[in-house]
Amino acid sequence: GAGVSQSPRYKVAKRGQDVALRCDPISGHVSLFWYQQALGQGPEFLTYFQNEAQLDKSGLPSDRFFAERPEGSVSTLKIQRTQQEDSAVYLCASSSTGDEQYFGPGTRLTVT
Amino acid sequence: QKEVEQDPGPLSVPEGAIVSLNCTYSNSAFQYFMWYRQYSRKGPELLMYTYSSGNKEDGRFTAQVDKSSKYISLFIRDSQPSDSATYLCAMGPGGFKTIFGAGTRLFVKA
């Protein structure tokens, strides 16, 4: 079956631009996670949804980061006024249980 | 000090070798332990999932958890060049909060 998909795969933004990253989870998975992965590091938790409810956003680095999942399926991570330190791979994962997470390929964001 | 410590390597072994990858952790509340494999420019892929202490085997892979020592391991038998990747340990108390290690880069030479 189809796995988690993310788009775009690569995004180059000028400093100060807003970006929107999309995640399509595995069908039927109620849990959805966003992670940020810096080069040479493991994924760092950003936020978690159960259906359309955002239950934890403690990992979002600043109020420039915003995530939504309005219908409990597709999710969008939005970064406003991008900064160079936002350059990273943004990973989305979905799960039916919460513990076993299945990841998408990621969106590589480069802020110039 | 990080909650999860993992040697970044790189670890280089000849084809056919047994590989041992390890992580230590500090939070005694962690109950769920996972290993992910990540190829370059791909998302992490779940390899092994274990609950609490003990061993779990799946083909050439064996995961071990020693909660008393706060130490987990992944063993790969008969390693292949296709096993060359970054291996991430991950763990959590249950629910949704998962903490990842930094990953160990493994190279298996033909």
Image (cartoon, grey):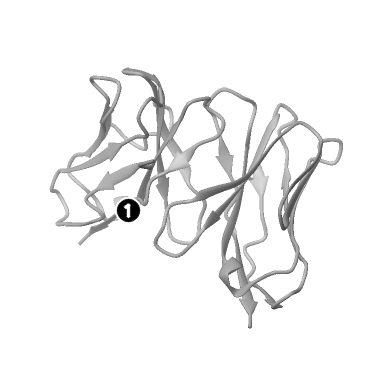
From where the camera sits, is residue A82 visible?
A: yes
Rate crowding at label 1 as few (under 14), some (14 to 19) or many (20 or more) other CA atoms within 10 Å: few
Determine the residue positioned at 14% across, 43% down: A18
Name the residue beneath numbered marker 1.
Answer: A85
Residue B101 location in percent, x, y?
60, 49
Determine the residue positioned at 24% across, 19% down: A71
Residue A61 location in percent, x, y?
37, 38
* Horizontal relation, residue A4 to residue B107: left or right: left
Numbered disc 1: secondary structure:
helix
> Residue A24 sits in which quadrant?
top left
Residue A7 location in percent, x, y?
23, 47
* Horizontal relation, residue B97 to residue A78: left or right: right
Determine the residue positioned at 48% across, 47% down: A43
Towards the viewer: A91 or B14: B14
- Residue A110 in the image: above or below residue B34: below
Q: Mark 1 lies on which chain?
A: A
Residue A23 location in percent, x, y?
29, 38
> Label 1 amino acid?
Glu
From where the camera sits, is residue B1 visible?
A: no
